[in-house]
Amino acid sequence: MSSSFTHFLSPTLLPLSSSSSTLSSLPTHQNFSSLLQKPSATLTSSAPFQKSTSEILSKHSWVETLRSQARSGLLLEAIATYISMLMAGVVADNFVFPAILKVAADLYDLNFGKQIHTQVFKLGYGSNSTTVDNTLVNMYGKCGDIRDARKVFDKMSERDQVSWNSIISALCRHEGWEDALEAFWVMQEENVEPSSFTLVSIVLVCGNLGVVDGLRLGKQVHGYSLRKGDVRTFIVNSLMAMYAKLGNVDYAKSLLYTFEERDLVTWNTMISSFSQNDRFIEALEFLKFMVQKGVRPDGVTVASVLPACSHLELLHLGKEIHAYVIRNEVLSDNTFVTSALVDMYSNCKEVTSGRLVFDNTQVRNIAIWNAMLAGYALNGRFEDALKLFIEMLEVAGVSPNPTTMASVFPSCVHSQEFLDKEGIHGFVIKLGFDRNTYVQNALLDMYSRIGKIEISKNIFDSMEQKDIVSWNTMITGFVVCGQHSEALLLLHEMQRLNDSEDEHEYDFRTFHRANSITLMAVLPGCASLSALAKGKEIHAYAIKNNMASDVAVGSALVDMYAKCGCLNVSKRVFDLMPKKNVITWNVLIMAYGMHGLGEEALSLFREMAAEALQGSDTKPNEVTIIAVFAACSHSGLVNEGLDLFYSMSDKYGINPTANHYACVVDLLGRAGKLDAAYELISSMPAQYDKTGAWSSLLGACQVHKNVELGEVAARSLIQLEPHIDSHYVLLSNIYSSAGLWEKATEVRKNMKQMGVKKQPGCSWIEFGDKVHKFLAGDALHPQSEQLHGFIEDLSERIKKEGYVPDTSCVLHNLDEEEKESLLCGHSERLAIAFGILNTPPGCTIRVSKNLRVCNDCHTATKFISKIEKREIILRDVRRFHHFKDGVCSCGDYCCEDWFGKLDIQNAVKNVGAIQSSHL
């Protein structure tokens, strides 16, 4: 036996408590400890049991009564019998101890079990009776003391098949998978043949070893059982659960069809496997199949199938299942079922119905409280969640667990009434949950959501045990806070630890490889930074690890490639996806719009709508319509956009929201139809938030130099959002463009008094394994001097080609020479210059900017692409610009001088021409 199994019993007696939590509930005041210490004691006349009764019962009768009560689950009665037996002067032996130890195990009463162990030791049965030792190992394992279970096992003089099964089962119960596997190997070395129960435990181990090792060993165990002809139902059930847990649900499904001795556990295993692997339709199909076979669903069935109704939003079917629960009263009292019902109604946006289920549940355990709290948070009813939490603590007196706190954190973050966001952290510390990994993960998310990413990082760094959720939450936190570079660096650190050969640095028990959630979290960072090389690396990782076919990962890849300017690759990934959801379609429609391909976006939208009419599960939603509006806006398809706006309710059952109104205002504003845009805002329902619509109009007013409407829009916005810098900046720019310098100065003065700071223009470009960032007039980059010199030379060269600086883009009261100098220092121009200087001739340059590209830089970049013979892909905050041979893919529709002059119906006739070689 290896050293990990060498744990010897202490030579001293186990401590004997003066009372037992179990015995305190029995109808006797006799000190149980003294009885156990004096097994030969006789009863006095004052004893609660009469001696005449004990004389009638033989020792055999006592033992049989005790064993029968233990087998029947009459646990407290069995303890009373045991006490009476001792008081009658009957000495416990190797027939009595296994029965009473089973009672202690079934009650999970470690203190009681240790008292029995003391008597075992005193009477000389310790390490001398294999049967007694086996029940001791089982008792310690079930009561949570794996250390003493090992001690008893290692001290045994003889071990049989049950001994090995008991220790392996105990190790599995405490998730000691590697130790359980080692015990299995040693068992075979000692020529003890595994039984059916051994195989069930080892199959459980396989399901927790990881896909590669788990499947390899699991198939060996499966083959062994087939060779032995041991295909009993409970073994097949465990094999099905293992294959499903390791992602091989179809193999589990095939097993179900191979044997006829299916029981309720078989069906429940299959249905829960489908639900846990997001194969919800099949879960429902198997429920129907099960009922057709005459098997009645129980609480486990219902609790397993309700998540399918939740995720598919099949409220009607969920209500049918609820009716079945009501008709079967035993299910109504099942807390797993009621918790699943609350979750189902909440996910189907019927949180009020979920609350009715909650209110009608007589016995509420912590699970149903947690389900209701999570349901309120999911539906945005954050104040209700916090009120329920207070009721749970102060009225119901239910103590929260880590899951409770993790469910409450989102409500603390988003509630407008709960101001002390960080106070909940102190409450968690008082509860002693601050070192719980699940709670720490929720804290990481909470602090990142309120913009305190440094606190999130401190918590992350201090965590003793990080699971994959910890890494994913921290990466997502960086993305949420706009720190995309840090998100990529953290992913790099995760990969570095995975590849580390330092035994002290790497711990396989606490580190996990990147999963699909990791990729979904970090790919938006690649997209925001236009980090194409890193995005390709992640794509390769997804393919290698069979994640590329995951619909969520695939959708993120479509988005990443599109935002990195590779629309052709984005479309290819879209076409290769075996399954697409509404997000996948929305991402590509939005991508076409950002690249100025409005007609293609409309065509894709019509294809999606046609598939929905043919029965596809993927139907256009509110975001789909927004994506189409954006595409029409970027391409000047005003009539098409308006037609959709006025027909969306009838055709697609989607009523216009505030966001839809804002998009149509943007559509009209870009086309110079400012009065129509203003009228549309005025017609919006009173309860709608008009912030987005006013913002769209203000941007259009700057483009078209409409001071009057610009002032109206700005006043409305500043009243709604007084701390947003863009409102002040746009109004100031409108005044500056009109030569109203005093008004522009006044706006900037007000902005300063309010403590609002302008977001600086920033551009970035990927080169090698780094993303290089540039601010306007940047002098901090290592190549700054070289870059500014190159730009001056470049400006002279493009002037010879016909470029004339547009100094109207400099909204400061300066002379022309100073304005030209400022234009040369714009961040996008610095990034483009860096790309030209550091990449081979002819290589495509990809640059991103956090603000809109100005007219002058747009014009200059067209000339630069021509004289440098480069394709330059520039993504600003609104759209993509593909520059090649002196032409831009936007057809100059984005530029101020073209608004109001362009025939908007023909604006994108030549949009795709420039991209033909790229698409």
Image: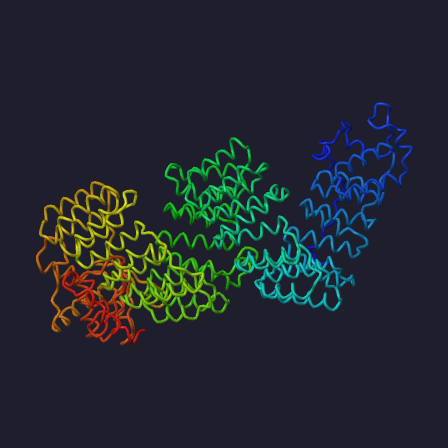
Left or right: 297 with respect to 885? right
Instruction: Please provide percent x and percent y for residue 805.
Output: 12, 64
Instruction: Please provide percent x and percent y for residue 843.
Output: 29, 74
Left or right: 510 with respect to 38? left
Residue situated in front as seen by the camera: 724 or 704: 704
Q: Residue furthest front?
A: 650
Residue situated in front as seen by the camera: 270 or 88: 270
Residue located 53% across and 54% down the image: 308
Residue 171 appears in the figure: yes
Q: How is the image coloured?
A: rainbow
Residue situated in front as seen by the camera: 685 or 44: 685
Left or right: 325 with respect to 11? left
Q: Is residue 328 above or below residue 499?
A: above
Instruction: Please provide percent x and percent y for residue 496.
Output: 47, 62
Q: Quadrant of residue 189?
A: bottom right
Residue situated in front as seen by the camera: 558 or 854: 558
Residue 698 appears in the figure: no
